[in-house]
Amino acid sequence: MRMLPRWGAWLSPALAWVASSCTQVVREEDLFHPERYRALEGDQYRRAVEISAADGAVLRGWFVHAPENQRTVIYFYGNAQTARSSESTTYWLSRSLHCNVLTVDYRGYGASDGNPAFRPMLQDAVSLYDALSDMLPEPQPVIAFGRSIGTVFATHLARERPLAGLILAAPPTGAEGAVQATQARVPIPLRWFLRLRADDSLTALDLQPIEVIREVTTPLLVIHGQRDDTVPFEHGQRIHAAAGSPEKRWLPLPDKGHSDWDIFDAPITQALRSFLDTHAGS
């Protein structure tokens, strides 16, 4: 057997040390990208709302209501977004798809109190649903619509409260999968020196969407771009396959990524209208 050069004896341990010293642990707070601003103001089109969370934090957002709309969507936006930056989406849901729409900034986002953290944010999603009884003159079908990180909260709500439908756009399967997707976007030369690992507290949480969705029997629509490199396409496929719902639809978006599409694109509007009309009236 050929002997290694003398420096080979210490090279391998040194490389191992470099690799381990460059492992970046992704913690819960690393997953959130909040933007803050002053309180939202209402106008003739929407009403500013304040909803008290279970721990007393005040969550602020908008409720778009029209008497002729007979169904309500709770919209959970994506990371690095806010109720304000989601205006075009909520407008389209209201005017073109005839939905009342509640969209509220997550804790620590926009005008809402507190700091982002998964467990209280999941409870916040339930608080939004419960608050609807004071906003609507009479009960009507409620649909949860989540995009990207918002799908985590929408999925949890579907497990905890009766919904007419659940719409998930670019849903991640869980913390480990999200970190692996981020690792895949690190330039190849840097992967030797930078390795990402989900913090144990994240992977141990009993709220991984791929597990929660198994308990959800709500009618389901999953939308995912085939070229999504933020939340890979396979995540949406796995969520759809694992869902406990006997009524589920799958809408792949060819040549689309994570953020280069919106609900007013014709194929998506058509799918949403068909799903909403089927499960929440016209």
Image: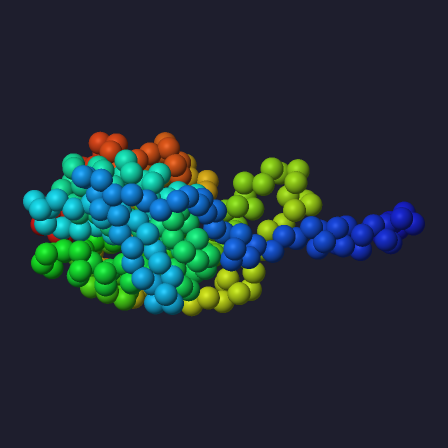
* Front residue of this view, candidates 27 and 83: 83
- Position of 186 compared to 143: left or right? right
Q: For the point 38% across and 67% down, which residue is it?
A: 55
Residue 10: x and y in percent read 86, 53
Instruction: Locate residue 66 relative to residue 194 in the image: left or right.
Output: left
Look at 66% across and 38% down and name the residue there: 189
Splitting the image into 4 quarters, where does residue 80 fall?
top left
Does 39 sit above or below residue 259?
below
Residue 50, quarter of picture: bottom left
Residue 64 at x, y percent in the picture: 20, 45
Q: Answer above or below: position of 168 versus 122.
A: above
Q: Is residue 19 left or right of residue 278?
A: right
**Count of all numbered marks drawn on residues in the image:** 0
* Residue found 27% across the figure and 66% down from its top: 160
> Going 55% across and 64% down the picture, which residue do you hit?
200
Does residue 263 appear left or right of residue 210 in this picture? left
Residue 208 is situated, as x and y percent measured from the top left of the image, at 41, 61
